[in-house]
Image (tube, grey):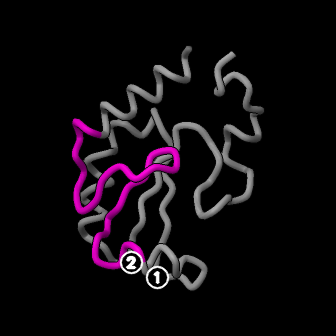
Amino acid sequence: TSLRKTLSVRERRGSFPAMRGILWQTDRAITFTTKPCPLCDDAKEVLEPYKRRFILQEVDITLPENSAWYDKYKYDIPVFHLNGKFLMKHRVDIQKFEDQLMKLEFVLKT
């Protein structure tokens, strides 16, 4: 069975606690951001047509509990992870995003 099929409804909805800064769930994209962040807003607009295919979680790196992410990404926002792995920074590479999302969906279907 696929990972998606083995996850309970609670797990798929993302109600499990954070693990090492990444929420444990399939097809989850995380953007590391600050407020305000015009580049982050632009990136989210570019990803808008894909919003039904993944869950986007925003992590404000300026919050005290996210200081490790701040140290790592303070000069690079927005930064995107897909399922816990670095994907891109500064702006959305839509082809790269689409390719990775398709790979992820293929794995989950098999």
Residue located at (29% from left, 70% from top): 76
Q: Is residue 62 magenta?
A: no
Rendered location of residue 71, percent (x, y): 43, 80
Marking on residue 40: none
Count the numbered circles shown: 2
Nearest the camera: 89 or 51? Answer: 89
Secondary structure under tag 1 reads loop
The residue that disc 1 covers is 62
Amino acid type shown at disc 2? Lys
Side of 7 relative to 35 (left or right)? right
Residue 100 placement (x, y as % from top left): 36, 34
- Residues at circles 1 and 2 in contact by the CB criterion of under 8 Å: yes
Q: Is residue 87 magenta?
A: yes
Position of 10 relative to 7 (above/below): below
Mark nearest the camera among 1 and 2 is 1
Instruction: Examine the image and state in which quarter residue 21 appears.
Output: bottom right
Q: Residues within 10 Å of mark 1 (few under 14, many from 20)?
A: some
The quarter holding residue 99 reads top left
| Residue on which the image places disc 2 | 35
* Residue 95 image position (x, y, % from top left): 22, 36
Q: Residues within 10 Å of mark 2 (few under 14, many from 20)?
A: few
Q: Amino acid at mark 1?
A: Thr
Q: Is residue 15 above or below residue 3?
A: below
Task: Compare residues 24 and 42 and report the one nearer the observer.
Answer: 24
Residue at the location (54% across, 76% down)? 66
Quadrant of the drawing holding the N terminus: top right
**Reading the chain from its start, which is encountered first: label 1 or label 2?**
2
Magenta residues? Answer: 72-96
For the residues labelled 1 and 2, the Cα–Cα distance comes to: 8 Å
Of all residues shown, which one is farthest toward the bottom?
64
Q: Is residue 73 left or right of residue 96?
A: right
